[in-house]
Amino acid sequence: MAAVAGIVLVLFAVNILLGSYTVTIPDFFRILGGADIPGASFIVLESKLPRAVIGLMIGVAFGIAGAVFQTMLRNPLASPDIIGISYGASASAVAAIVLFGAAGATVSFSALIGALVVAAAIYLISRRGGVAGYRLILVGIGFAAVMHALVNFLITRADLRTAAEAVLWLSGSLNSSNWDRVAVLLACLVVLVPGAAVLSRSLQGLELGDDAAAGLGVRVEASRLWLMFTAVALAAVATAAAGPVASVAFLAGPIARRLLANRSSLAMAALVGAVIVLAADFVAANLIPGASLPVGVVTGALGAPFLLWLLATANRSGQGG
């Protein structure tokens, strides 16, 4: 875990110091100390640093959210990307952009509300007779399909400029990062990350199955509800800050498990999520000279082959359908 934490620190520094505009380490610390270096101070303090900080935080949030769902439901497909929560945020945000001309904080707030509403609907529909993992995933996939269709419909009804704004938001981007978003996201994570850590003991019990968890003294339904709320809130605030950055929640948990010899760890998933976002954002910002791609384009490109690999290995081990 220490090695992955070191990689996070290196990537954080790389995103700030390197790229289309390079900054030396001494100049960086001079800027942090209050020195005004023409050009460099503005680029570091108003662009590179907040972008790297938000990238780090959304990686942590998506990583924990994905790991909670995948561990709790004992299925690597059970991430906010797959079961409709991210699509709920997207549909709500696009509706705000297309129907009401919303921008900035209003779009972020709409995404947050959309994710929470869709998550509540998925839980209520799937809880009949007790929430079963496969049932929640199937209901979530159904909601994802409906929300995706709604997004496509809204975009086709929008004018060209509005549609372009909606598509850019849907790509998941750190290009509009600023210190206001950093403050809001940090305040949310200060509450939610310790909450996830406190609930991790119940999560370990649920990983063994409902009967085993109950035998260990875990209040199964109450614990599942609080874990779902925490994971949904983490995914929602990350989506509100940067848009639905694809595949991070889906990728972080299984990769973290591989690194820990098939043991679950929210801390490792958080670090892996941060690595994915920071590495992908550096590639996105510097892949095409003179252009900065949305980070979701790069992370989304990683998700499809990983899903195919996951399905192929599951079938070889007799776990697939």
Image (spheres, rainbow, N blue to C red):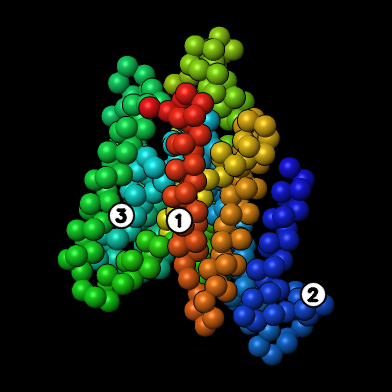
At 53% from the left and 45% from the top, the residue drawn is 251
Q: Nearer the viewer, residue 60 or 7?
A: 7
Residues 264 and 68: in front is 264
Q: What is the distance, in whole Å, between disc 1 and disc 3 at their CAs?
A: 21 Å
Q: In screen coordinates, is 216 left or right of 293?
A: right
For marks 1 and 3, give the one nearer the viewer. Answer: 1
- The first of marks 2 and 3 along the sequence is 2
Q: Which residue is mark 1?
A: 300
For label 2, the SS is helix
Task: Please tell me whether mark 3 sits on a helix, a strand or a loop.
Answer: helix
Amino acid type of the residue tagged 3 in the rendering: Ser
- Residue occupying the far top of the picture: 215
Are there few (<14), some (14-19), or many (20+) residues within 10 Å of tag 2?
few
The correct choice, above or below, for 104 with respect to 187 in the image is below
Name the residue type under label 2: Ile
| 1 or 3: tag closer to the N-terminus | 3
Q: Measuring 82% from the left and 77% from the top, which residue is drawn there?
A: 26
Q: Quadrant of residue 9?
A: bottom right
Q: Which residue is mark 2?
A: 25
**Dot 3 corresponds to which residue?**
92
